[in-house]
Image (spheres, rainbow, N blue to C red):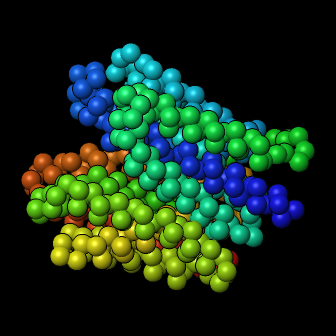
Amino acid sequence: MKERSTATFVALFLAALALRPEIIGVGPLIPSIENSFGASHAVVGLLGTIPVLCMGLFAPVAAYLAVKIGTRRAMTIGLALIGTFGIVRAAMPSVWLVVLFTWPVGIGMGLGNALAPIFVKEHFEDRRATGTGIYTGGIQIGSLGAAALAVPLAAWLGGWRWALIVISSFALLSLVAWLALTREERPYEAPAAAMPHLPWRSHTAWLLVAAFALMACGYYGLNAWLPEAYAEHGWSAGAAGLLLAMTNLTAIPSSFLFPWLSDRTGRRSPFLLGLSACLTVGAAILVAAPGIAYVGGLLAGIGQGGLFALVMTLPLDFEKTPKRVAALVAMMLGLGYTIGATSPFVLGAVLDLTGSFDAVLWVTAAFFAVQFFVIIALVRRHPSAARV
């Protein structure tokens, strides 16, 4: 039984590795893609916007599939979409076809992202924060690997197409591992009512939406604008990139450690509040005190990694059955990612109005500050979620 549990943990981790590289890996390759097609920034920018939208729009579909055909089969579909259409997309002869085939890749990412917490609820009820830390850590590692390797792969293999093909091939390897390491103990039987009802009237659900949306907006803002803000302060491109890399690297152990500690201690609230405060203070230091930027980056990374994992755990604490968890996750991620997808536009507008990257970072820090008060409201509203 312990061997099966370990294998399931490994399967979840390997599946999570495939849930971000198709969007993160494209970022460093955008200049090459633009030059290859002679395309505009706006058109190529859709390669980043579409997957984020899909993670919002298709979270409710993932909830439906989890109940209708089971999380194992639904995750299989998601990973297959990511890997297969990632390769197809890389081979397309026009930029519009590349954009078109980004949609099924994004749909697969949207399905997998929303299915992971449901899978944790089904298989790791007694260690749900640890299970959540496993897949959020996988997401962090996959993201960092894609960001670090995309440009070298393109240089070694002869262009951006081959870099994306390699990244997509790893998603197919994750699919093979998922199928090999998970299994259905008995044929899956869908319940009579397969469509989960989203908890539109739940105040707790709306607080979760707010917490996740604010975190998404702040995360995308920090990753998109931090290097350029520090270039404005006179830092070299390499030094600014190193600051961002350190922030993201710090998030990886944090996403494993704090969920595990919250399971061991049986408490959530100290970690939720502490990590949210850490993220807020770190973001404020990054904009207000460039002289100690690495302290701010360290605090922001610790807060971001741990908080992401614990916020993803909260729907599992608030609801008791996988079906109700699926509905709550669908609402939280569906609306949260959709709102988060507007962040690049909003922050870009702030930059246009002020002409200052510092103003953009202050807005990002404000997102995290507001989230801190939302976390307080969540802990007060359902204290048992913090002690489970």
For the residue pair 21 and 160, the one nearer the viewer reads as 160
Image location of residue 227, percent across then percent down? 23, 56
Q: Quadrant of the C terminus?
A: bottom right
Q: Residue at x 56, y 34 (%)?
A: 169
Q: Is residue 352 above or below residue 95?
A: below
Direction from residue 4 to residue 355 in the image, left or right: left
Q: Residue at x 37, y 28 (%)?
A: 158
For residue 58, which quarter of the picture? top right
Q: Is residue 348 above or below residue 305?
A: above
Q: Is residue 19 above or below residue 322?
A: above
Image location of residue 215, percent across then percent down? 41, 61
For residue 221, which quarter of the picture? bottom left
For the residue pair 220 and 242, the one nearer the viewer reads as 242
Image location of residue 249, percent across then percent down? 42, 63
**Residue 224 in view of the camera:** yes
Direction from residue 274 to residue 346 in the image, left or right: left
**Residue positioned most to the top:** 93
Direction from residue 261 to residue 233 in the image, left or right: left
Q: Residue at x 36, y 65 (%)?
A: 247
Q: Residue at x 75, y 41 (%)?
A: 179
**Residue 193 in view of the camera:** no
Direction from residue 37 to residue 190 in the image, left or right: right
What is the number of callouts on the image?
0
Q: Quadrant of the N terminus?
A: bottom right
**Residue positioned most to the right:** 186
For the residue pair 215 and 150, the one nearer the viewer reads as 150
Image location of residue 3, percent across then percent down? 83, 60
